[in-house]
Amino acid sequence: MALTPKKSVIRQVSAVSESPPVSQTIENSHLEAGGPTAIEPALAQGLRPLQTPPKDKPPGNGKPLDFSKRLEIPRELPGADAPPIVLPPVDLDVPGLRDEAIDALFPLLPTMRPNLEVKHPPEQKRMSLDELQEMALSNNPLVVQAAADVDSAVGVAVDVGAYPNPTVGYEADTVGSAGTRNYQGIFFTQTIKTAGKLELAQASANVDLMDAQLALRRARIDLITRIRSQYFAVLVAKQAVVASSALVRFTNEVYRVQVDQVKGSQAAAYEPMQLRVLAVQARAALVQAQNRYASAWKQLAAAIGIPDLPLAELEGKPDVLVPAIDYDAAVSYLLGSHTAILTARNAEHRARIDLRREEVAPIPDVLVYSAIQRDFTTPGAARTTYNVQLGLPLPIFDRNKGGILNAKGKLLRAVEETGRVRNDLAGQVADAFERYETNRVLADYYKNQILPDQSRVYRGTYERHQQEPDAVGFFDVVLAQQNLLNSIASYISALNAQWQAVTDLAALVQVENLYEVERLGAAPAEPVQLPPPPAEPPAKIPAEEPAK
């Protein structure tokens, strides 16, 4: 049996019809060899297949399709009113006319000037991070204020434990009742504190003093962290200025080479414009980098406490190896020595002391009154008398039950505060460590692999475009250059994020020397010693209280 070749009925849609009728469309089908055709049922229903138009005729009504109107740039967009590119033809009689028109269309870009220059002599020593930190600790008012708060807390702790002062005065009784001076003399009063109330008050004030000392330490760490963060921001910003300056020169040269090729009729007139866009974008990136460098230095000077500090070269580079940090060691260290955890422990201790103070508050203090007087009621027979009073308030109506209940609630909250702070700090370390690990690897990849490869790709693409323009088009060159520029920007961003993460980790573990974070496997620092408990042990919260 002879085989009949398979035919194909294709879907044909007119270019001017958005939704063709069913009568003009028949889905693809194939004819089986020697069997009934798949289109016979369709023909039986009055449908007919359409034939594929000849290849030498355009689809639709036979006229070429015109998309020019649909591809016009909307006039609302900035730059849409730019005139089209028009170059005069090559005129052998006037050889420089075309070149003049090209130079007018593609003028030289202006030279970029730095907006912030180093003013010190080149032989001056570069400033190190340690020097900047010492300058800040000596000039920034935050540390001075925190130290003043410690002195203030010492004064409060001294006064609060002192015994109440007695009262001495003059007293005259029933003067004139018998036509005489009656009783004339002096009196004395004293309050005698009971139940160890003074010791409890001083213990509570001692906790406040320890909190002030922890606040001083925290102020030092916070200031050092600010200096450290701004120091690396200046280094990265300077690196961005150097890289952006090189990119300005590089993109400008590529742009001018393409202009020369247009003059030599080796490139289309529109091609340099795409490269000029990249050159101008590189200049914009340089302006941004210069402004960022200026701002970073001014912020560093302000953090040091010398806002008018002149710009100086800093020691170090942002592309050096970062400190090696172990996550478990960092968490273990900070959970044993962080000021926030120590402050939370102090708060719990103070809450226990305050609860005890509220419990002994109903115990009355003793009031002593004494007076020594001269009795003048009998003329010529004056004599000395004295009065003595001892009194105390009776805790009948006010037994401070509300104050005790309030103190118990605060103690329960303080007991849970340490756990809350630990959890919060552990979460912060996890976030900072994730950023540290990610950006450390990214910066290494970009520096040692991505950027070298992108440079090779660009050089190879451009060289092959010059040799085989049909195989490698102009836009391949543009794409390779864009990828190179974007990779450099991503590398600078990764450097900045990397050092910010290192700074955040060092701030969390509260080390004053950045590279101390590499030695966190050692035992944590000894916590600040708490004050001794009062003479009477603080009362414990009853077991049923939390359930209530």
Image: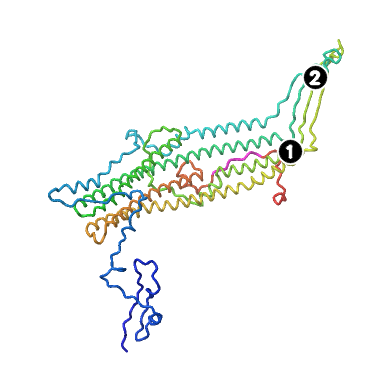
Start and end of the magenta stretch?
525-532
Residue 172, position as x, y percentages in the image: 80, 18
Observer-nearest residue: 495 or 289? 289
SS under mark 1: helix
Observer-nearest residue: 402 or 229? 402
Q: In the drawing, what numbered circle is on residue 159?
A: none
Q: Is residue 28 magenta?
A: no
Which amino acid type is marked by label 2? Answer: Ile
Count residues near mark 1 (Cα–Cα under 10 Å), then give few for <14, some for 14-19, many for 20+: some
Which residue is under mark 2? 372
**Location of residue 173 (image quadrant):** top right
**Location of residue 63 (image quadrant):** bottom left
Residue at (35% x, 66% y) in the render: 16
Task: Check the image and report above or below for 78 versus 116.
Answer: below
Q: Does the magenta stretch include residue 528?
A: yes
Residue 436, position as x, y percentages in the image: 45, 50
Which residue is under mark 1? 360
The mark tally for this picture is 2
Question: Image check: 162 left or right of 28?
Answer: right
Query: Can you name the residue that lies furthest to the left here?
Result: 93
Count residues near mark 2 (Cα–Cα under 10 Å), then give few for <14, some for 14-19, many for 20+: some
Observer-nearest residue: 151 or 245? 245
Which amino acid type is marked by label 1? Answer: Val
SS under mark 2: strand
Q: Earlier in the sequence, mark 1 or mark 2?
A: 1
Question: Image check: 197 left or right of 474?
Answer: right
Residue 445, position as x, y percentages in the image: 38, 54
Query: Can you name the residue that lies furthest to the top here?
Result: 380
Residue at (28% x, 41% y) in the render: 111
Task: Check the image and report above or below for 291 versus 168.
Answer: below
Residue 233, position as x, y percentages in the image: 41, 43
